[in-house]
Image: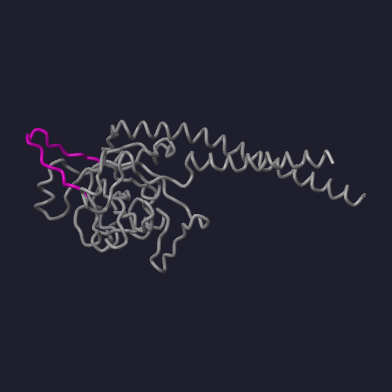
Amino acid sequence: MATQQVKRSAYRTLLGGLSLLTGYGAFYHFTKYSQSNRHWNAVSKSIQEFQPIEIKGQDAVQYPWLAQGELNNWEYKVVKIQGWFREERFFVRRQRDGKEGYLVFAPFITSTRKLESEHNSAVNPQENNTVFVNLGWVPLENKLDIEMTGEPVELNEAPEDELDIHFDRFTNFTNDPEPYVEEDTFSLTTITALVRKGETQNILQGRRNWPSQGVFQYIDLDYMARFFRVFNLDGARAAYLERIVPDYDEEESELYPVPASKDNFEQPLQTPSSHLSKFYFLGGTSALSIISALSLLKR
């Protein structure tokens, strides 16, 4: 009899501890759900309004989300920025609607400045400030098509009136593309994109990189910045841009990569729905633990 009482007491203690832990977990995820839900409502409103913030001048050299130290406030804001794409591409494995494929990244130069001869090198002959752009998603079977294509976004057109041509002393760019085309150096383009944070390893979610094998399953901006030997390491690994268009019909366009749109963009692992599902699970577990503990007390 005494042994049974000891066992019941131990079970009650165990269930009580379990109910406290799961109750705390449920409270935590409900709090995160409330915060995340408010954040996502604001994000959704900003994306649906689709009024890009123009990043130019000094901001195209020192990106405001880094300079202001407010990446959380800038994430998912729609921005517009001018520059040119390097030819290299970087691929990160990602499923889309249950189909295997890749996110296609490209280094995007937003400002440039030739270095003095004594500071020049074969690696960085000039000071190019770079931000990585997620151009969109491509199926596994179309990866080589992306590697062999040229400019992914339409080039800027020259202003009709010469009086509208101006030179930006911060970026060393002009809005007249002709000089760049004639010199066969680069051609400017303007992209509209979402500001996004990089990702970290998450083995439970299958996001792990094997650089030695060329396999990348999460967006490691630090690795990408070092791999491409960019000049502005801090700026390149602070955030990336996800190209976005107002509307996109994949079946009609039949073009890859598929860019993000107002209704379909790359989302993080932790969204309001994921926090809510964890709240329900932990809340239910806590409730069952309390009921079980109370039933033992009645015996």
**Residue 2 place in picture, x, y as percent:** 92, 49
**Residue 263 place in picture, x, y as percent:** 33, 40
Tell me which corner region of the image, top left, top right, bottom left or bottom right, holds residue 173. Answer: top left
Tell me which corner region of the image, top left, top right, bottom left or bottom right, holds residue 80. Answer: top left
Q: Which secondary structure is most common in the magenta stretch?
A: loop
Magenta-colored stretch includes residue 163: yes
**Residue 121 place in picture, x, y as percent:** 28, 61
Left or right of 144 on screen, residue 162: left
User: Colour scheme in the image?
Assistant: one colour
Residue stretch in magenta: 153-170
Residue at left 42%, top 49%? 198
Which of 14/289 is in front?
289
Q: Residue furthest left?
A: 161
Left or right of 112 on screen, residue 177: left
Magenta-colored stretch includes residue 253: no
Residue at left 47%, top 47%? 269
